[in-house]
Image (cartoon, rainbow, N blue to C red):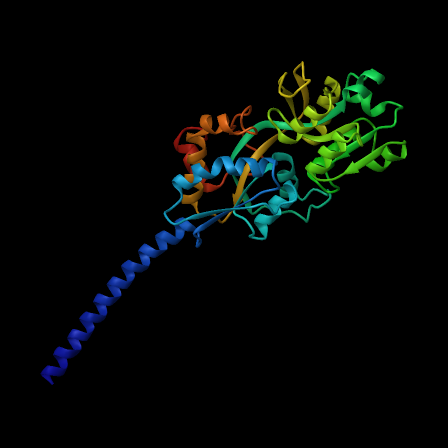
Amino acid sequence: MRKAKILLGCLLLTSVFISLVTGCSNGSNEKADTRSAGSDQLVIHTMGPGTWPYVSSETLTPYFKEVLPEGFQIEKSPIATGDISGVYLLREKQGDLTMVSDLPAEWVWDGKPYPNIDKEYQQFRKLLQVDSYGGIGFLVSRKIVEENGFETVGDLLTADVPLTIATLPAGSSSLIMTEQIMKGYGIDSLETFESAGNTVLQGGTQDIVKYIRDRQADVYAGLIVGYNFPMVEEMTTSIDMVILPFEQDKLEQISDEFGFHSFTIPENSYKGMTNDTTILGLGGYIIVREDMSDAIAYDLTKAMYENWSEIQQSDPYFSITEMHFRETVVPFHQGAEKYLKEIGELE
């Protein structure tokens, strides 16, 4: 009996010891899981080569690698077909982080009734946001401009002259915004524009460059970044072109109605640009899934913020814009918010 009691006591002590060890081990694992959100990979989904998400993901990756946990892998996946697609890929868990223009992200957040908006989606958050990095403008053959005396976008869109315009595909945020601008000039749709004797050619970035270079199109309507934008550089080195300015009253009217900002492209940004030119501008978000761990979001935000000057020197999209911390429709991720409060950028 005495031996049985001693044996039972030993078993109980062993059981308690195992429970304590197991409990400590589980606590440690939970901490690691909280940091990595159950994954050891950061998937940055982008659009194709030359686009903002593609180029800037290349710029940011080395800074992200410095702060991610040991063993973390970064995968860049060029599967997005546009800003709107990029946001919804977060919903489908096909990516963890992407870069989008602010207006399309806000359309998705609000579930705006625009093409490709598949109902309201709000399970994403921003790490950082930037003021206008580019905008929607009209790049026109100088020959057409001089032959017809065009001085502004209004002259172009309301002229009784048949035009061929190259744009990104139907449903793209760039084309949606181009149509919004046309509405500001009394043209209610692309179909109306075409019925007046004009032609619209749609395609990807390289298609558009080819349309302009081969003189199949006189005008490019869409995103123009303020400096060193590969697509615009290719067009302006192939053909003598002009970026037409908007009239001040139209800038204000269209901005108020659709949420644009004004954005000035500095002179000499591209071949043939001899003046500063103001167009309808877009800001940008670096966004992630809402369920990204706070620790990862904190570290990614810190990496970008602390190295921003260096990032600007090597990235054409960030080179002429600044971070801002104003309240917008899309909230900051909790991890980003924690860091930005610590450094005094947020209250």
Q: Residue at x 42, y 44 (%)?
A: 296
Left or right, 167 with respect to 196, comes to: left
When asked about the image quadrant of residue 25, the answer is bottom left
**Residue 164 appears anywhere in the view:** yes
Q: Position of residue 83 (x, y in %)?
A: 63, 40
Q: Residue at x 38, y 50 (%)?
A: 71
| Pick the front one: 61 or 264 | 61
**Residue 179 appears anywhere in the view:** no
| Pick the front one: 193 or 139 | 139
Left or right, 231 with respect to 96, comes to: right
Residue 59 position (above or below residue 18)? above
When asked about the image quadrant of residue 20, the answer is bottom left
Quadrant containing the C terminus is: top left
Q: Position of residue 253 (x, y in %)?
A: 74, 24
Left or right, 153 with respect to 268, comes to: right
Q: Position of residue 203 (x, y in %)?
A: 74, 40
Q: Residue at x 50, y 28 (%)?
A: 314
| Pick the front one: 205 or 178 | 205
Left or right, 265 with respect to 160, comes to: left
